[in-house]
Image: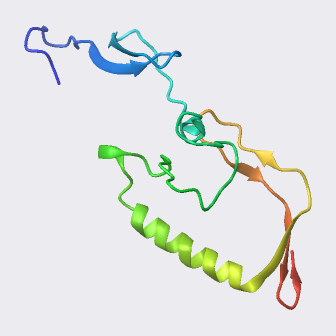
Amino acid sequence: MRSLLAPPGVRRPKRRNVKSARNVSQTHFWTPIDRLVAWIGSANRDESVFADPFKFDIARKPNPHLGFGAADHFCLGALLARLQLRRIMTAFIEHVDEIELTGAIENVASHQFSGFKSMPVRVKARNRVIA
């Protein structure tokens, strides 16, 4: 939103509430030369939100993760993605007895996303082994 007092072509500083390292709410005025980095990959590992943020817990409740964004930036396909994942995982679990890690896990090198670049596994199905 442009300020009515600012001349054309000049942006007014943005005003946002931010949390400091001591968790004290402050107001900061962003100027065009300020730089901001959103560490999205760390959002779901906040110790003040999750009891054990670095543990993979598929049954975590409540689970206020930000995987699909939030508010105005919430993913329109989130409902479909959850439905697809539920169906895929249900079918997978029905046909698999065991999953074994067979090599080193390689993480994605990114400040924006966290995940695996490579995770070699062996899957033992009900009657046979598929690699």
Q: Residue at x 53, y 56 (%)?
A: 61
* Residue reaching furthest to the left: 4
**Residue 100, located in which quarter of the rendered image?**
bottom right
**The N terminus, quarter of image:** top left
Q: Which residue is drawn at 28% across and 17% down?
A: 14
Q: Could you tell me residue 99's position as x and y percent?
A: 83, 70
**The C terminus, quarter of image:** bottom right
- In the image, is 98 to the left or to the right of 61? right
* Residue reaching furthest to the bottom: 127
Q: Could you tell me residue 71's position as x and y percent?
A: 32, 45
Q: Is residue 2 above or below residue 70?
A: above
- In the image, is 27 to the left or to the right of 6? right
**Residue 44, located in which quarter of the rendered image?**
top right
Question: 60 and 109: which one is in front?
Answer: 60
Q: Residue at x 15, y 20 (%)?
A: 2
**Residue 78, located in which quarter of the rendered image?**
bottom left
- In the image, is 61 to the left or to the right of 101? left
* Residue reaching furthest to the right: 102
Q: Could you tell me residue 128's position as x and y percent?
A: 88, 88
Q: In this view, does 39 lie above or below 126?
A: above
Q: Could you tell me residue 30's position as x and y percent?
A: 34, 13
Report how many numbered discs are placed on residues in the image.
0
Q: In this view, does 43 lie above or below 115?
A: above
- In the image, is 14 to the left or to the right of 126? left
